Image (cartoon, grey):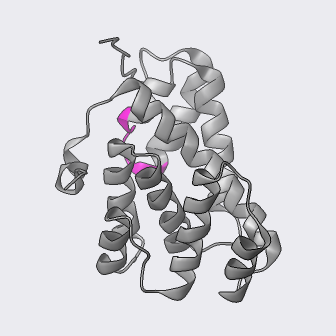
């Protein structure tokens, strides 16, 4: 098995340190995924820039976490499922909706269900949505422009999902309670 080191603020390349500082300020820690990504300043800086835009966008934090958790489950990244389960619950997602997503079902909240379905469909169809996919999303009360914003969230989560799957990083203690599959 190939080992990918989890870098720290001290061991990371200089160009990765500002991104790590930003993540540490936001999470109160440097997540293992960020420590692994830090060995590539291009990757860690791309992630931080994209996530900054995603979390400053049109969706509420529970809506963003709905998409991120759906993506993690759809991409089968155990680390990201546990991480976004914790963040989703912290953001106020209904625990039953979180469990539904973890079990590959739609949340009962209509808007969250529409977001989850669109995210899952984007991944499964590799972006080749049809009119029906968009119409369902719009029928839930979202504008077509927000379907494009979901693409940005999916892109951001793809970075973490793929990194987590390629590197098989260990799950931190604070997220162990949300290990997946449960």
- Magenta span has 39? no
In the image, residue 117 sits, relative to residue 83, either above or below, namely below
In the rendered image, the residue lying farthest to the right is 145
Question: The C terminus appears in which quarter of the rendering?
Answer: bottom left
| Residue placed most toward the observer, 30 or 58 | 58
Q: Position of residue 97 (x, y in %)?
A: 37, 77
Residue depicted at 43% across the width and 25% down the height: 36
Residue 115 lies left or right of residue 164; in this view the side is right
In the image, residue 104 sits, relative to residue 135, either above or below, namely above
Residue depicted at 34% across the width and 73% down the height: 100
In the image, residue 27 sits, relative to residue 101, either above or below, namely above
| Residue placed most toward the observer, 15 or 121 | 121
Q: Position of residue 142 (x, y in %)?
A: 72, 82
Residue depicted at 39% across the width and 43% down the height: 77
Residue 177 lies left or right of residue 68; in this view the side is left
Q: Position of residue 116 (x, y in %)?
A: 53, 69
* The residue stretch that appears in magenta: 26-32
In the rendered image, the residue lying farthest to the top is 2
Q: Is residue 102 visible?
A: yes
- Magenta span has 27? yes
Q: Position of residue 107 (x, y in %)?
A: 42, 79
Residue 93 lies left or right of residue 178; in this view the side is right
Q: Quadrant of residue 103?
A: bottom left
């Amino acid at each position: 098995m190939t080992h990918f080191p989890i870098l720290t603020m001290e061991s990371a390349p200089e160009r990765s340190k500002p991104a790590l500082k930003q993540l540490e300020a936001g999470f109160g820690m440097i997540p293992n995924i960020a420590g692994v990504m830090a060995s590539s300043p291009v990757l860690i800086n791309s992630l931080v820039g994209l996530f900054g835009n995603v979390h400053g966008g049109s969706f509420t934090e529970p809506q963003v976490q709905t998409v991120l958790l759906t993506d993690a489950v759809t991409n089968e990244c155990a680390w990201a499922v546990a991480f976004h389960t914790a963040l989703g619950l912290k953001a106020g997602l209904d625990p039953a909706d979180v469990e539904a997503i973890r079990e590959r079902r739609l949340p009962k909240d209509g808007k969250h269900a529409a977001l989850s379905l669109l995210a899952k469909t984007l991944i499964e169809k590799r972006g080749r949505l049809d009119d029906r996919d968009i119409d369902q999303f719009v029928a839930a009360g979202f504008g077509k422009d927000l379907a494009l914003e979901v693409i940005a969230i999916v892109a951001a989560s793809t970075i973490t999902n793929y990194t987590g799957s390629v590197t098989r990083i260990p799950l931190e203690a604070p997220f162990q309670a949300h290990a997946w599959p449960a």
